[in-house]
Every structure is written in C-alpha cells, then in structure tokens.
Amino acid sequence: MTLKLETPIYGLLAEFDGEHELMHAAEQVRDAGYRKIDAYTPVPVHGLSEALGLPRSRVPLIVLCGGLIGGTTGLLLQYWTMAKAYPLNVAGRPLAAWPSFIPPAFEMTILFASFGAVFGWILLNSLPQPYHPVFNVKRFERATTDGWFLSIEASDPKFEYGETRQFLASLGAKEVSDVEH
C-alpha cells in the first residue's frame, strides 16, 4: 500500500486578458473579502494598489527620515569641525559660518534620503527574492511581456479551494492555475 501525499498549494493564479479586466477582478476579489492577494503585470498600472486594498507605502517616511538625518549630520559635522575640533579664524569671520554650511548639508540630505529610498524599498519588498511559488506556473513566464495575473494565497482566511477557483473563473479569467510550493 502506497501513501500518496498531496502537494500543498501556495494559492491560485488567474490570468486575465488585459489591464481593465485585471483591475475589475482585483476590485471584486478585494470586495469579496480576500486580503492575501497580489497582481503581476508587464507594465505599471495606475490605481492597482488601491484596487488590491494594499496599505500606503512607508518608503516616503523612510526617505524623509533619511533626509532629516543627513541634513542634521551635515550641519553638525561642519559645526564640530569648524568651531570645536579645528577652530580657525579666517579674516575675522565667525567660527560657525552657517551660510557656508548649507551646500554640503544639502548634499548630505540628498545622499541620506537616496540611501533611505533604496534600502527602504529593498527591505520593505523582502528583496532579493530569487524564488517565488508563482514561478512554478508555466504561463507565468508571460507576466513580463503580455500577461495580466492575479493571485490569491491559500493562507488567506477566506480561501476555500473550490469556491475560490470558481469565483476567479466567474470574474472572466482566461485560465486559473494552481500554484504549488
């Protein structure tokens, strides 16, 4: 007697004809109460994040914090260098000549904000991610050329295989595929 173990699935992946069909399906899936959903498109789609019900990105806050830290660091470093560590009286000017500190502090602001944007984006997106279960679906190769995909994870509290599969098909999906781990 041989025991056959079923492969647990990651979720379901539905392919749609285009941008408008995908947007409509994403709104319907969100309104149906699914929360662990994602969309894969060959081009950026304006409004897709809202249609999926995704929260606002925290990257702008990280960039702001990075810029504030960079500007403050630039000003304090110059003040410490010119007024505390190596005080030089040049032509009777004050040791802390703030107007001359502005260009380097501005550059530090841009540098730290840029680092915040890049590293915040990488960390919040859990990158690098060389493998994802949707790569197991053969048709997913089209996601970078002309494929419009919507996935629902099996870990979603509302996910029930047969019902969810039928729901995705009713939204006008060309094909609904199982995504294996």
Image (cartoon, grey):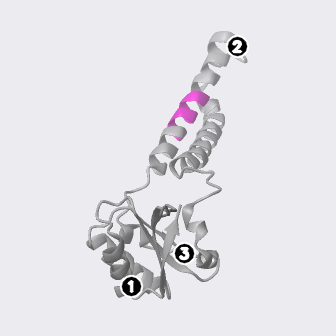
Question: Left of 67 or right of it: where is 93?
Answer: right
Q: Secondary structure at mark 3?
A: loop
Q: Which residue is mark 3?
A: 41
**Height in image: 45 above or below 85?**
below
Hey, what amino acid is under mark 3? Answer: Thr
Q: In this view of the protein, which residue sits in the foreground, 33 or 83?
A: 33
Q: Secondary structure at mark 2?
A: loop
Q: Position of residue 148 (x, y in %)?
A: 52, 80
Of the two numbered discs 3 and 1 in the rendering, the one whose residue sits closer to the viewer: 1
Q: Is residue 69 magenta?
A: yes
Give the residue pinned by disc 1: 169
Q: Secondary structure at mark 1?
A: helix
Which span of residues is magenta-colored?
67-74
- In screen coordinates, is 154 left or right of 62? left
Which one is nearer the viewer's eye here, 115 or 171? 171
- Magenta stretch prevailing secondary structure: helix
Residue displayed at 67% across by 17% down: 81
Q: Residue at x 64, y 80 (%)?
A: 145
Rendered location of residue 65, percent (x, y): 48, 39
The reply to whether the C-beta atoms of the residues labelled 2 and 3 are less than 8 Å apart is no
Q: Amino acid at mark 1?
A: Ala
Distance from the alpha carbon under mark 3 to that under mark 1? 19 Å
Q: CA distance from mark 1 to mark 2?
A: 78 Å
Q: Is residue 96 shown to the viewer in this render? A: no
Please give the residue where the numbered disc 2 appears in the rendered image: 89
- The structure residue drawn at horizontal position 46% and vertical position 61%, both measured from the top left corner, is 8
